[in-house]
Image (cartoon, rainbow, N blue to C red):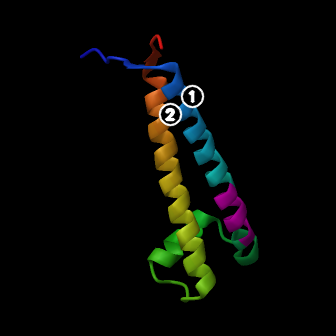
């Protein structure tokens, strides 16, 4: 089955590009925030999530913050990836 490109106006392409850039900024800021926790506890965020989800660590407030940061990053990544799909699968049409 042949995949059809989506026709989008240049203004829409620009807006989607800006939204994608906002996603990238949000992801970078979230990573900055949880890198401090990674350094403090000596775990990567993936290691932390495994321990947290398995109930292997305490219920310190910082752990809930770390979890929220990781979940927010995942949401922003999903949005960014969706925008990238739209932008990659689009063709610019006349204004």
Dot label at residue 90: none
Whole-percent x, y for residue 17 in the image = 57, 32
Q: CA distance from mark 1 to mark 2?
A: 12 Å
Residue positioned 59% across, 80% down in the render: 63
Dot label at residue 84: 2
In this view of the protein, which residue sits in the foreground, 85 or 38? Answer: 85
- The local crowd at label 1, few if under 14, some if 14 to 19, many if 20 or more residues have their Cα within 10 Å, is few
Magenta region, residue range: 29-36
Above-or-below relation of 34 to 89 = below
Identify the image quadrant of residue 53.
bottom left
- The local crowd at label 2, few if under 14, some if 14 to 19, many if 20 or more residues have their Cα within 10 Å, is some
**Nearest to viewer (mark 1 / mark 2):** 1
Whole-percent x, y for residue 39 in the image = 75, 70
Whole-percent x, y for residue 91 in the image = 45, 16
* Image quadrant in which the N terminus is located: top left
Q: Is residue 70 left or right of residue 42?
A: left
Q: Which is more N-terminal, label 2 or label 1?
A: 1
Element type at mark 1 = helix
Q: Main secondary structure of the magenta part?
A: helix
Q: Is residue 57 left or right of residue 53?
A: right
| Label tally | 2
Residue reaching furthest to the front:
95
Residue positioned 52% across, 34% down in the render: 16
Above-or-below relation of 45 to 84 = below
Residue positioned 48% across, 25% down in the render: 88
For disc 1, the marked residue is: 14
Q: Is residue 21 left or right of residue 56?
A: right
Whole-percent x, y for residue 86 in the image = 44, 30
Residue positioned 57% across, 28% down in the render: 14
In this view of the protein, which residue sits in the foreground, 93 or 62? Answer: 93
Q: Is residue 84 magenta?
A: no
Q: Is residue 23 left or right of residue 91?
A: right
């Amino acid at each position: 089955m042949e995949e059809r490109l989506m026709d989008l106006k240049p203004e829409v392409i620009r807006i989607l590009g800006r939204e994608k850039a906002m996603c990238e900024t949000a992801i970078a800021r979230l990573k900055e925030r949880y890198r401090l926790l990674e350094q403090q506890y000596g775990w990567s965020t993936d290691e932390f999530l495994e321990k947290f989800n398995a109930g292997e660590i305490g219920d310190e407030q910082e752990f809930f913050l770390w979890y929220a940061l990781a979940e927010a990053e995942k949401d922003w990544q999903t949005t960014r990836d969706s925008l990238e799909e739209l932008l990659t699968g689009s063709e610019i049409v006349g204004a």
